[in-house]
Image: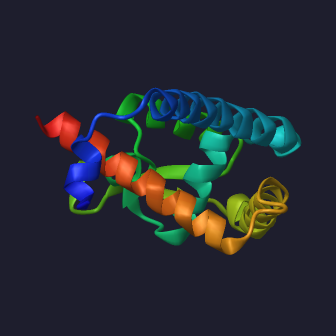
Amino acid sequence: MSDRAALTSVPTEAARRDRAELTRTMMLLARSVRAMFDAQARDMGLTFARAQAILAISRDEGLKQTQLAETLAIETPTLNRTLDGLEKLGFVERRADPDDKRVRQIFLTEHARANASEIETFVEALRAKLYDGIDADEVARARKTMERMQANLERMRGQ
């Protein structure tokens, strides 16, 4: 059976239950990972969103706010709240783009640069605990499946 036929075939009752349970599990897992991250990162003044922003900026300093929002797959108002919090903590600064004063670029402060490797280490340790007992092949298959699901969602948005 081709991939297209498999996608359009009518699932069995057991398959429908598995799909429903998998969707529920993914949603719960995402919330649980974020909550665990937030709880463990609180001492650093971070949340999941703030840490993701710092790591994205550290990979490409000088990003425009719109580019950073796109990289993080969040809306600009949400990013602004995250950046406001990071600015108050002394992690980032917004500077006017030299070519267009209306555009803001994002840079890490020295404080953030000094802590970026600690944040990266913290994130890696959390991931190691999360994936404990799960082999690389399982992770690769799960990632491939979720990427296909994401592509399906993108197609749905385009309809």
Q: Position of residue 16 (x, y in %)?
A: 45, 29
Looking at the image, can residue 70 be seen?
A: no
* Relative to 145, residue 136 above or below: below
- Which quadrant of the structure image shows residue 115? bottom right
Say whether residue 14 is left or right of residue 100: right
Say whether residue 126 is left or right of residue 66: right
122 or 10: nearer the viewer: 10
148 or 17: nearer the viewer: 17
Residue found at x 14% / y 39%: 158
Say whether residue 25 is left or right of residue 4: right
- Which quadrant of the structure image shows residue 69? top left
Looking at the image, can residue 119 be seen?
A: yes
Which quarter of the figure is the N terminus placed in? bottom left
Residue found at x 69% / y 67%: 113
* Relative to 111, residue 36 above or below: above
Which quarter of the figure is the C terminus placed in? top left
Residue found at x 40% / y 52%: 68
Total residue callouts: 0
49 or 26: nearer the viewer: 26
